[in-house]
Image: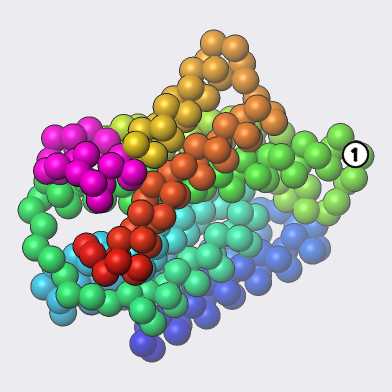
């Protein structure tokens, strides 16, 4: 529990340093970086120690939620360290802290033995959800930036963001990576998960496929028709909403409401 509390405090410290940086209209400062790296490392250590004690990887609701939060924090740290979208940490680091707190308080269950094929499927899914969640936040940021510029509201936080074209390019690159990971998730599910269209998995499968189609359609529209702006934002958020319902919605109902795994 001590590790968890330290990790949460470091996440909040990193977020606070970014807020202070934005309030003073500074861009490119890296004082937040060390706390963010340390928080993510302790976050990872929390899961590793729990899995070692349980004898296997726990992929249930709160554990999966925490791992997605960890993935989002790690990608945000990498983005920010490279000089892009460090401001995203203002949102992502508290989300990661909350997901870790939920896992520490409610998430530990007896681990089930999974062979390498199911583990591959699970890890592809978690990486896909984390990457596409970052894409959803980028889409919201893009919408806010466009809205402020249209209204000629030149807030200080705008100076901390990349130019509109660069932010849009980053959004589509993130979606492309997430789409590849989501494709791998669906393929490994078809190949390795028994009874993929069984009653307790059919909603998850159908919603995941619909989300994959939307993300794929968005990338195709970007390539062939140059889709951007509000169109990209709407498609991204709609596809992400389906993905959240597919994974966490189904896991919430099955595991927390019905008590099934």
Spot occupied by residue 18 in the image (x, y as percentages of width and height): 66, 64
Q: Residue at position x 8%, y 53% from top?
A: 115
Report which residue position mark 1 lands on: 151
Relative to the observer, which residue lies in front, 2 or 252?
Answer: 252
* Left or right: residue 54 compared with residue 181: left
Spot occupied by residue 200 in the image (x, y as percentages of width and height): 25, 50
Spot occupied by residue 121 in the image (x, y as percentages of width and height): 21, 45
Q: Residue at position x 33%, y 45% from top?
A: 204
Spot occupied by residue 99 in the image (x, y as percentages of width and height): 45, 69
Q: Is residue 35 above or below residue 154?
A: below
Mark 1 burial class by Cα count in 10 Å: few <14, some 14-19, many 20+: few
Residue 194 position by quadrant: top left
Relative to the observer, which residue lies in front, 242 or 62?
Answer: 242
Q: Is residue 260 above or below residue 138?
A: below
Q: Residue at position x 53%, y 31% from top?
A: 172
* Left or right: residue 1 compared with residue 198: right
Residue 216 in sight from this viewpoint: yes
Q: Which SS class for mark 1?
A: loop
Relative to the observer, which residue lies in front, 203 or 115?
Answer: 203
Q: Which residues are magenta?
A: 185-205
Q: Is residue 230 above or below residue 129?
A: above
Tell me if residue 192 is in the magenta stretch. yes
Residue at the limit of the structure toward the top, as seen here: 224
For the N terminus, the quadrant is bottom left
């Amino acid at each position: 529990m001590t590790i968890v509390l330290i990790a949460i405090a470091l996440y909040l410290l990193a977020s606070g340093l970014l807020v202070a940086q934005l309030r003073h209209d500074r861009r490119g400062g890296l004082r937040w970086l060390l706390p963010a790296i340390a928080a993510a490392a302790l976050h990872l250590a929390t899961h590793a120690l729990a899995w070692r004690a349980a004898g296997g990887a726990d992929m249930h609701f709160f554990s999966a939620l925490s791992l997605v939060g960890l993935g989002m924090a790690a990608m945000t740290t990498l983005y920010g360290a490279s000089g892009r979208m460090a401001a995203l940490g203002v949102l992502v680091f508290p989300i990661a802290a909350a997901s870790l707190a939920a896992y520490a308080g409610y998430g530990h269950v007896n681990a089930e033995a999974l062979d390498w094929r199911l583990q591959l499927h699970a890890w592809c899914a978690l990486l896909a959800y984390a990457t596409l969640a970052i894409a959803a936040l980028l889409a919201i940021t893009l919408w806010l930036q466009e809205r402020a510029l249209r209204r000629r509201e030149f807030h200080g936080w705008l100076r901390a963001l990349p130019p509109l074209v660069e932010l849009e390019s980053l959004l589509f690159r993130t979606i492309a990576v997430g789409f590849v990971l989501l494709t791998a998730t669906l393929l490994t599910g078809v190949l390795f998960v028994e009874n993929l269209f069984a009653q307790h998995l059919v909603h998850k499968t159908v919603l995941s496929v619909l989300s994959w189609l939307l993300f794929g359609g968005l990338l195709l529209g970007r390539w062939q028709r140059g889709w951007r702006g509000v169109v990209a934002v709407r498609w991204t958020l709609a596809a992400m909403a389906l993905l959240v319902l597919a994974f966490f919605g189904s896991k919430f109902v099955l595991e927390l409401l019905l008590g099934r795994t």
